[in-house]
Amino acid sequence: MPAFDLPPTELEHYRPDVEEPGGFDAFWRSTLEEAGRADPLVSVREVETGLRLTRTWDVTFRGFAGDPVRAWFSTPAAAGRALPAVVEFAGYGRGRGLPHERLTWVNAGYAHLLMDNRGQGDQYGCGGDTPDPHAGVPGGPGVMTRGLRTPEDYYYRRLITDAVRAVAAVRALPGVDPARIAAAGNSQGGGLALAVAGLVPDLAALLVTAPLLCGIRRCLDLTDAAPYGEITAYLAVHRGVEHDAHRTLSFVEGVSFARRALAPAHFGVGLRDTVCPPSGAYAAFNRYGELAGQEPRKELHAYPYNGHEGGDAVQVRRQLLWLRAVLEGRDGTQGAAPSAPARVAP
Protein backbone atom coordinates (compact mmCIF):
# COMPACT_ATOMS: atom_id res chain seq x y z
CA MET A 1 0.00 0.00 0.00
CA PRO A 2 1.58 3.33 -1.02
CA ALA A 3 1.77 6.23 1.40
CA PHE A 4 -1.65 7.90 1.57
CA ASP A 5 -1.54 10.34 4.49
CA LEU A 6 0.31 13.65 4.76
CA PRO A 7 3.90 13.87 3.45
CA PRO A 8 6.57 13.22 6.10
CA THR A 9 7.68 16.85 6.18
CA GLU A 10 4.11 17.90 7.02
CA LEU A 11 3.62 15.11 9.55
CA GLU A 12 6.64 16.29 11.52
CA HIS A 13 4.91 19.60 12.24
CA TYR A 14 1.31 18.42 12.25
CA ARG A 15 -0.50 19.98 15.23
CA PRO A 16 -4.22 19.94 14.48
CA ASP A 17 -6.75 21.79 16.57
CA VAL A 18 -8.56 19.53 19.00
CA GLU A 19 -12.27 20.02 19.51
CA GLU A 20 -12.40 19.10 23.17
CA PRO A 21 -15.91 18.82 24.60
CA GLY A 22 -16.93 20.92 27.53
CA GLY A 23 -16.52 18.94 30.71
CA PHE A 24 -13.81 16.62 29.37
CA ASP A 25 -11.76 16.72 32.58
CA ALA A 26 -14.81 16.57 34.84
CA PHE A 27 -16.14 13.57 32.90
CA TRP A 28 -12.99 11.56 33.45
CA ARG A 29 -12.47 12.76 37.00
CA SER A 30 -15.94 11.61 38.07
CA THR A 31 -15.61 8.33 36.14
CA LEU A 32 -12.29 7.46 37.79
CA GLU A 33 -13.38 8.61 41.24
CA GLU A 34 -16.33 6.23 41.11
CA ALA A 35 -14.16 3.35 39.91
CA GLY A 36 -11.52 4.02 42.56
CA ARG A 37 -13.73 3.79 45.63
CA ALA A 38 -12.81 0.16 46.26
CA ASP A 39 -9.42 -1.53 46.57
CA PRO A 40 -8.26 -2.59 43.11
CA LEU A 41 -7.38 -6.24 43.73
CA VAL A 42 -9.97 -9.02 43.87
CA SER A 43 -7.76 -12.10 43.69
CA VAL A 44 -4.17 -13.13 42.93
CA ARG A 45 -3.47 -16.80 42.23
CA GLU A 46 -0.16 -18.24 41.05
CA VAL A 47 -0.44 -20.57 38.05
CA GLU A 48 1.79 -23.26 36.58
CA THR A 49 2.90 -22.36 33.06
CA GLY A 50 5.76 -24.79 32.44
CA LEU A 51 8.23 -21.87 32.40
CA ARG A 52 11.13 -22.25 34.83
CA LEU A 53 12.50 -18.72 34.60
CA THR A 54 9.18 -16.90 34.99
CA ARG A 55 6.52 -16.87 37.70
CA THR A 56 2.96 -15.98 36.70
CA TRP A 57 -0.18 -15.11 38.61
CA ASP A 58 -3.77 -14.99 37.42
CA VAL A 59 -4.95 -11.59 38.66
CA THR A 60 -8.47 -10.22 38.90
CA PHE A 61 -8.89 -6.52 39.62
CA ARG A 62 -11.81 -4.10 39.79
CA GLY A 63 -12.27 -2.00 36.67
CA PHE A 64 -15.09 0.24 35.53
CA ALA A 65 -18.08 0.12 37.91
CA GLY A 66 -16.18 -2.43 40.00
CA ASP A 67 -16.46 -5.04 37.24
CA PRO A 68 -13.92 -7.89 37.54
CA VAL A 69 -11.13 -7.66 34.95
CA ARG A 70 -8.61 -10.44 34.39
CA ALA A 71 -4.87 -10.03 33.81
CA TRP A 72 -1.66 -12.03 33.74
CA PHE A 73 1.06 -10.83 36.11
CA SER A 74 4.56 -12.21 35.56
CA THR A 75 7.97 -11.63 37.10
CA PRO A 76 11.42 -13.14 36.66
CA ALA A 77 11.59 -16.23 38.88
CA ALA A 78 14.77 -15.03 40.59
CA ALA A 79 13.56 -11.50 41.34
CA GLY A 80 14.78 -10.53 44.80
CA ARG A 81 13.84 -6.86 44.94
CA ALA A 82 11.02 -4.54 44.01
CA LEU A 83 10.90 -4.31 40.22
CA PRO A 84 9.70 -1.64 37.84
CA ALA A 85 6.58 -2.83 36.03
CA VAL A 86 5.25 -2.61 32.49
CA VAL A 87 1.46 -2.58 32.18
CA GLU A 88 0.64 -3.76 28.67
CA PHE A 89 -2.62 -3.35 26.77
CA ALA A 90 -3.61 -5.62 23.89
CA GLY A 91 -4.82 -4.73 20.42
CA TYR A 92 -8.34 -4.63 19.05
CA GLY A 93 -10.08 -8.00 19.06
CA ARG A 94 -7.51 -9.64 21.32
CA GLY A 95 -7.79 -10.93 24.85
CA ARG A 96 -5.01 -11.66 27.29
CA GLY A 97 -4.43 -15.06 25.68
CA LEU A 98 -1.98 -17.38 27.43
CA PRO A 99 0.75 -16.13 29.76
CA HIS A 100 3.67 -17.54 27.77
CA GLU A 101 2.71 -15.56 24.64
CA ARG A 102 4.22 -12.27 25.84
CA LEU A 103 7.55 -12.66 27.59
CA THR A 104 9.57 -9.71 26.25
CA TRP A 105 9.15 -7.43 29.25
CA VAL A 106 9.63 -10.06 31.91
CA ASN A 107 12.74 -11.31 30.09
CA ALA A 108 14.05 -7.76 30.24
CA GLY A 109 13.80 -7.91 34.03
CA TYR A 110 10.49 -6.12 34.59
CA ALA A 111 7.34 -7.15 36.34
CA HIS A 112 4.65 -7.39 33.65
CA LEU A 113 0.89 -7.02 33.84
CA LEU A 114 -1.08 -7.86 30.68
CA MET A 115 -4.67 -6.63 30.94
CA ASP A 116 -7.52 -8.52 29.34
CA ASN A 117 -9.84 -6.51 27.06
CA ARG A 118 -13.39 -6.77 28.37
CA GLY A 119 -15.76 -8.22 25.79
CA GLN A 120 -12.95 -8.93 23.30
CA GLY A 121 -10.72 -11.87 22.49
CA ASP A 122 -12.60 -13.55 19.65
CA GLN A 123 -10.66 -12.24 16.62
CA TYR A 124 -6.97 -13.02 17.26
CA GLY A 125 -4.67 -14.89 19.58
CA CYS A 126 -5.85 -17.34 22.22
CA GLY A 127 -8.96 -15.63 23.54
CA GLY A 128 -9.96 -13.56 26.54
CA ASP A 129 -11.57 -14.17 29.91
CA THR A 130 -13.33 -10.90 30.78
CA PRO A 131 -16.96 -10.34 29.77
CA ASP A 132 -18.46 -6.86 29.46
CA PRO A 133 -21.53 -6.75 31.73
CA HIS A 134 -22.64 -3.55 29.97
CA ALA A 135 -22.65 -5.02 26.47
CA GLY A 136 -26.41 -4.59 26.18
CA VAL A 137 -26.18 -0.87 25.36
CA PRO A 138 -27.15 0.03 21.77
CA GLY A 139 -24.50 -0.31 19.06
CA GLY A 140 -22.44 -3.02 17.54
CA PRO A 141 -21.68 -5.58 16.39
CA GLY A 142 -18.09 -4.55 17.16
CA VAL A 143 -17.11 -2.83 20.41
CA MET A 144 -15.97 0.25 18.46
CA THR A 145 -19.61 1.32 18.12
CA ARG A 146 -21.08 -0.09 21.32
CA GLY A 147 -22.80 2.76 23.15
CA LEU A 148 -21.50 5.23 20.55
CA ARG A 149 -24.37 7.71 20.91
CA THR A 150 -23.52 8.85 24.44
CA PRO A 151 -20.14 9.19 26.20
CA GLU A 152 -21.60 7.69 29.38
CA ASP A 153 -22.53 4.46 27.57
CA TYR A 154 -19.56 4.24 25.22
CA TYR A 155 -17.48 1.08 25.39
CA TYR A 156 -14.17 2.93 25.52
CA ARG A 157 -15.20 4.77 28.65
CA ARG A 158 -15.23 1.38 30.32
CA LEU A 159 -12.05 0.05 28.71
CA ILE A 160 -10.02 3.20 29.42
CA THR A 161 -11.18 3.08 33.04
CA ASP A 162 -10.07 -0.56 33.21
CA ALA A 163 -6.66 0.51 31.90
CA VAL A 164 -6.24 3.17 34.58
CA ARG A 165 -7.31 0.70 37.25
CA ALA A 166 -4.74 -1.79 35.92
CA VAL A 167 -2.03 0.65 37.00
CA ALA A 168 -3.55 0.84 40.48
CA ALA A 169 -3.70 -2.95 40.55
CA VAL A 170 -0.07 -3.50 39.64
CA ARG A 171 1.00 -0.98 42.26
CA ALA A 172 -0.82 -3.06 44.87
CA LEU A 173 0.97 -6.29 43.92
CA PRO A 174 3.98 -7.50 45.94
CA GLY A 175 7.42 -7.13 44.41
CA VAL A 176 6.57 -4.02 42.37
CA ASP A 177 8.16 -0.59 42.71
CA PRO A 178 5.06 1.64 42.54
CA ALA A 179 7.12 4.65 41.49
CA ARG A 180 8.37 2.97 38.32
CA ILE A 181 5.34 1.97 36.25
CA ALA A 182 5.30 2.16 32.45
CA ALA A 183 2.27 1.82 30.18
CA ALA A 184 2.76 0.12 26.82
CA GLY A 185 0.72 -0.96 23.81
CA ASN A 186 0.28 -1.12 20.06
CA SER A 187 -2.81 -0.11 18.07
CA GLN A 188 -5.79 -0.20 20.45
CA GLY A 189 -3.28 -0.97 23.20
CA GLY A 190 -1.36 2.14 22.22
CA GLY A 191 -4.50 4.24 22.46
CA LEU A 192 -5.19 2.83 25.92
CA ALA A 193 -1.61 3.44 27.07
CA LEU A 194 -1.82 7.03 25.83
CA ALA A 195 -5.09 7.55 27.70
CA VAL A 196 -3.45 6.20 30.86
CA ALA A 197 -0.59 8.67 30.43
CA GLY A 198 -3.10 11.50 30.28
CA LEU A 199 -5.08 10.29 33.30
CA VAL A 200 -2.32 9.03 35.63
CA PRO A 201 -0.05 11.99 36.37
CA ASP A 202 2.73 10.01 38.09
CA LEU A 203 3.26 7.40 35.38
CA ALA A 204 6.99 6.75 34.88
CA ALA A 205 7.02 6.09 31.13
CA LEU A 206 4.89 5.55 28.03
CA LEU A 207 5.58 3.24 25.07
CA VAL A 208 3.10 3.55 22.21
CA THR A 209 3.08 2.34 18.62
CA ALA A 210 0.45 2.95 15.90
CA PRO A 211 -2.13 4.21 18.39
CA LEU A 212 -5.87 3.84 17.80
CA LEU A 213 -8.22 6.66 18.89
CA CYS A 214 -5.85 9.45 17.81
CA GLY A 215 -7.08 12.06 15.35
CA ILE A 216 -10.35 10.15 15.13
CA ARG A 217 -12.27 12.55 12.88
CA ARG A 218 -9.48 12.60 10.29
CA CYS A 219 -9.03 8.84 10.48
CA LEU A 220 -12.72 8.33 9.67
CA ASP A 221 -12.17 10.38 6.51
CA LEU A 222 -9.01 8.51 5.51
CA THR A 223 -9.75 4.83 6.02
CA ASP A 224 -12.56 2.31 5.89
CA ALA A 225 -10.37 -0.39 7.44
CA ALA A 226 -11.54 -1.87 10.72
CA PRO A 227 -11.92 -0.81 13.43
CA TYR A 228 -12.55 2.76 12.21
CA GLY A 229 -14.57 1.26 9.37
CA GLU A 230 -17.02 -0.10 11.94
CA ILE A 231 -17.93 3.47 12.83
CA THR A 232 -18.49 4.55 9.23
CA ALA A 233 -20.57 1.42 8.58
CA TYR A 234 -22.67 2.16 11.66
CA LEU A 235 -23.24 5.77 10.62
CA ALA A 236 -24.16 4.63 7.11
CA VAL A 237 -27.09 2.76 8.65
CA HIS A 238 -27.94 5.12 11.52
CA ARG A 239 -28.23 8.33 9.54
CA GLY A 240 -28.56 11.54 11.49
CA VAL A 241 -26.66 10.51 14.62
CA GLU A 242 -23.29 11.79 13.42
CA HIS A 243 -23.28 14.74 15.82
CA ASP A 244 -23.88 12.54 18.85
CA ALA A 245 -21.28 10.02 17.69
CA HIS A 246 -18.60 12.64 17.12
CA ARG A 247 -19.29 14.18 20.52
CA THR A 248 -18.92 10.78 22.17
CA LEU A 249 -15.66 10.11 20.34
CA SER A 250 -14.28 13.48 21.46
CA PHE A 251 -14.29 12.17 25.05
CA VAL A 252 -11.86 9.37 24.12
CA GLU A 253 -9.68 11.33 21.68
CA GLY A 254 -6.07 10.35 22.20
CA VAL A 255 -4.69 13.77 21.31
CA SER A 256 -6.62 15.25 24.24
CA PHE A 257 -5.07 12.70 26.58
CA ALA A 258 -1.64 13.37 25.05
CA ARG A 259 -1.92 17.09 25.81
CA ARG A 260 -2.34 16.27 29.51
CA ALA A 261 0.44 13.67 29.76
CA LEU A 262 3.62 14.16 31.77
CA ALA A 263 5.54 10.89 31.47
CA PRO A 264 8.54 10.43 29.18
CA ALA A 265 7.19 8.95 25.94
CA HIS A 266 8.44 6.73 23.12
CA PHE A 267 6.35 6.62 19.93
CA GLY A 268 6.53 4.45 16.82
CA VAL A 269 4.59 4.81 13.57
CA GLY A 270 4.49 3.21 10.13
CA LEU A 271 3.93 5.82 7.44
CA ARG A 272 1.91 3.37 5.30
CA ASP A 273 -0.47 2.43 8.08
CA THR A 274 -4.02 2.35 6.70
CA VAL A 275 -5.49 0.94 9.93
CA CYS A 276 -4.37 3.78 12.22
CA PRO A 277 -3.26 6.55 9.84
CA PRO A 278 0.07 8.08 10.85
CA SER A 279 -1.27 11.63 11.16
CA GLY A 280 -3.05 10.48 14.33
CA ALA A 281 0.19 9.36 15.98
CA TYR A 282 1.97 12.54 14.92
CA ALA A 283 -0.86 14.70 16.22
CA ALA A 284 -0.58 13.00 19.61
CA PHE A 285 3.22 13.21 19.61
CA ASN A 286 3.43 16.85 18.54
CA ARG A 287 0.90 17.96 21.14
CA TYR A 288 2.12 15.57 23.82
CA GLY A 289 2.58 17.27 27.17
CA GLU A 290 1.65 20.76 26.00
CA LEU A 291 -0.48 21.36 29.12
CA ALA A 292 2.28 20.14 31.45
CA GLY A 293 4.12 23.45 31.72
CA GLN A 294 7.29 22.00 30.21
CA GLU A 295 7.77 19.57 27.37
CA PRO A 296 8.29 16.03 28.64
CA ARG A 297 11.06 13.85 27.30
CA LYS A 298 9.77 12.24 24.13
CA GLU A 299 10.90 10.69 20.87
CA LEU A 300 9.27 9.20 17.80
CA HIS A 301 10.55 6.61 15.33
CA ALA A 302 8.96 6.60 11.88
CA TYR A 303 9.12 3.67 9.44
CA PRO A 304 8.41 4.95 5.91
CA TYR A 305 7.88 1.53 4.32
CA ASN A 306 5.91 -0.12 7.10
CA GLY A 307 2.20 -0.24 7.74
CA HIS A 308 0.32 -1.11 10.92
CA GLU A 309 3.12 -3.40 12.06
CA GLY A 310 5.30 -0.29 12.48
CA GLY A 311 8.91 -1.14 13.21
CA ASP A 312 7.98 -4.59 14.56
CA ALA A 313 10.95 -6.18 16.37
CA VAL A 314 13.22 -3.25 15.53
CA GLN A 315 10.83 -0.94 17.37
CA VAL A 316 10.68 -3.30 20.35
CA ARG A 317 14.48 -3.31 20.57
CA ARG A 318 14.44 0.48 20.62
CA GLN A 319 11.75 0.44 23.31
CA LEU A 320 13.79 -1.90 25.49
CA LEU A 321 16.90 0.27 25.36
CA TRP A 322 14.95 3.50 25.84
CA LEU A 323 12.93 2.22 28.79
CA ARG A 324 16.00 0.95 30.57
CA ALA A 325 17.63 4.36 30.23
CA VAL A 326 14.50 6.17 31.45
CA LEU A 327 13.81 3.97 34.46
CA GLU A 328 17.42 3.87 35.54
CA GLY A 329 17.48 7.67 35.38
CA ARG A 330 14.90 8.24 38.10
CA ASP A 331 17.47 10.09 40.18
CA GLY A 332 16.18 13.35 38.75
CA THR A 333 17.08 13.04 35.09
CA GLN A 334 13.93 11.13 34.15
CA GLY A 335 11.37 13.38 32.52
CA ALA A 336 13.82 16.20 31.82
CA ALA A 337 13.09 17.75 28.47
CA PRO A 338 15.78 17.56 25.80
CA SER A 339 16.64 20.70 23.86
CA ALA A 340 14.17 19.57 21.19
CA PRO A 341 11.87 16.56 20.93
CA ALA A 342 13.51 13.77 19.02
CA ARG A 343 12.04 12.61 15.73
CA VAL A 344 14.29 9.76 14.72
CA ALA A 345 14.57 8.32 11.24
CA PRO A 346 14.78 4.54 10.81
Image (cartoon, grey):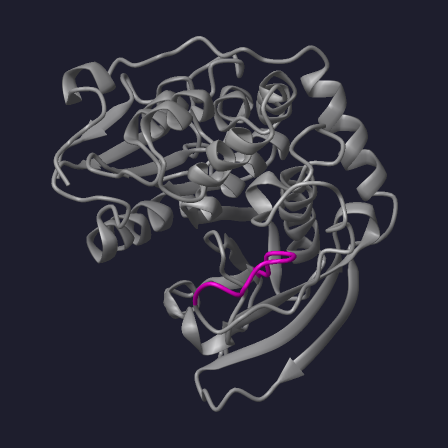
Q: Which residues are magenta?
A: 115-124
> Relative to 237, is 148 on the left or the right?
right
Q: Nearer the viewer, residue 187 or 339?
A: 187
Q: Is residue 111 above or below residue 234?
A: below
Q: Quadrant of the C terminus?
A: top left
Q: Is residue 242 above or below residue 68?
A: above
Q: Is residue 67 above or below residue 44?
A: above
> Relative to 132, is 304 on the left or the right?
left
Q: Residue at x 32, y 26 (%)?
A: 222
- Classified by dominant secondary structure, the portion drawn in magenta counts as loop
Q: Residue at x 50, y 28 (%)?
A: 254
| Extreme-right residue of the structure | 37
Instruction: Give the x, y percent position of residue 11.
Output: 24, 19
Instruction: Give the x, y percent position of residue 109.
Output: 42, 65
Give the image quarter of residue 67. Answer: bottom right
Q: Nearer the viewer, residue 99 or 131?
A: 131
Q: Residue at x 33, y 32 (%)?
A: 223
Q: Can the viewer see residue 330?
A: no
Instruction: Give the x, y percent position of residue 169.
Output: 70, 55
Q: Is residue 49 magenta?
A: no
Give the image quarter of residue 118. Answer: bottom right
